[in-house]
Image: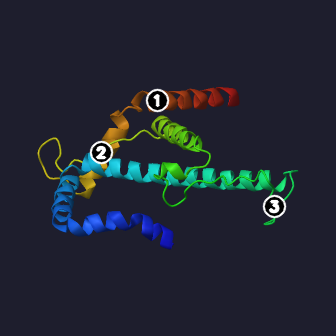
């Protein structure tokens, strides 16, 4: 954990030196997030979800690299050094806590594998879970009256009745009526 603190120390020092600017920037950002919450909240949740997926991917690549290095060293047929490792021992690893330190990746091409996985994850998120803005619930009805809970329920029923699934629902009702009529005919 001390290694992580050592790596993050310059960022911490920079924040301490520029506290006022970061405070003003934070207040402005908070105001913008509140004012534009229809777009900003889904974007923030999307970014958090993407970050979780990247953390899972980075952990998987880190563990796979360590496992591969262990297997390579354990299954080597070369003579052992005094420390018990083979002559052709590898030190493959990825920097788990500081993935932005690209020079610490061994072998170097693992960086490109992780970047490719990050792009694939983003493409899969866009394909299976595209980001959508929040739907604002109306506060006023068509006639200009302020809606209470009963009015909102009525609008929800009307939206379900005349919404995008209107024809699908109507066709299902017609098919159900036809089936019921066929059952009545068969009974007679």
x, y percent for residue 35: 18, 52
Q: Would you place residue 139 above or below residue 186 in this image?
A: below
Q: Nearer the viewer, residue 153 or 110?
A: 110
Left/right placement of residue 91 relative to residue 84 reads left
| Mark 3 or 1, closer to the camera | 3
Q: Residues within 10 Å of mark 1 (few under 14, many from 20)?
A: few
Residue 81 - label = 3
Do the numbered discs 2 and 1 sit on residues whose CB atoms are within 8 Å?
no
- Residue 79 in sight from this viewpoint: yes
Q: Nearer the viewer, residue 5 or 154?
A: 5
Q: Secondary structure at mark 1?
A: helix
Q: Which residue is mark 1?
A: 168
Do the numbered discs 3 and 1 sit on residues whose CB atoms are within 8 Å?
no
Q: Which residue is mark 2?
A: 135
Q: Residue at x 36, y 41 (%)?
A: 132
| Mark 2 or 1, closer to the camera | 2
x, y percent for residue 68: 73, 50
Q: Secondary structure at mark 2?
A: loop
C-alpha distance separating marks 2 and 1: 22 Å
x, y percent for residue 42: 34, 48
Q: Residues within 10 Å of mark 3 (few under 14, many from 20)?
A: few
């Amino acid at each position: 954990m001390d290694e992580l603190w050592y790596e993050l120390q310059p960022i911490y020092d920079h924040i301490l030196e520029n506290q006022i600017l970061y405070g003003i920037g934070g207040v402005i950002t908070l105001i913008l997030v509140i004012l534009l919450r229809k777009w900003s909240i889904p974007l923030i949740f999307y970014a958090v979800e993407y970050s979780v997926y990247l953390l899972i991917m980075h952990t998987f690549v880190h563990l796979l690299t360590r496992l591969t290095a262990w297997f390579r060293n354990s299954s080597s047929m070369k003579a052992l050094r005094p420390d018990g490792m083979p002559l052709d021992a590898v030190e493959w690893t990825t920097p788990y806590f500081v993935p932005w330190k690209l020079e610490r990746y061994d072998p170097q091409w693992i960086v490109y594998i992780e970047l490719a996985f990050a792009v694939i994850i983003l493409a899969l998120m866009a394909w299976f879970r595209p980001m959508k803005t929040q739907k604002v619930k109306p506060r006023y009805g068509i006639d200009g009256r302020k809606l209470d809970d009963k009015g909102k329920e009525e609008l929800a029923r009307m939206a379900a009745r005349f919404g995008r699934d209107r024809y699908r629902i109507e066709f299902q009702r017609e098919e159900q009526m036809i089936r019921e009529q066929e059952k009545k005919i068969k009974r007679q």
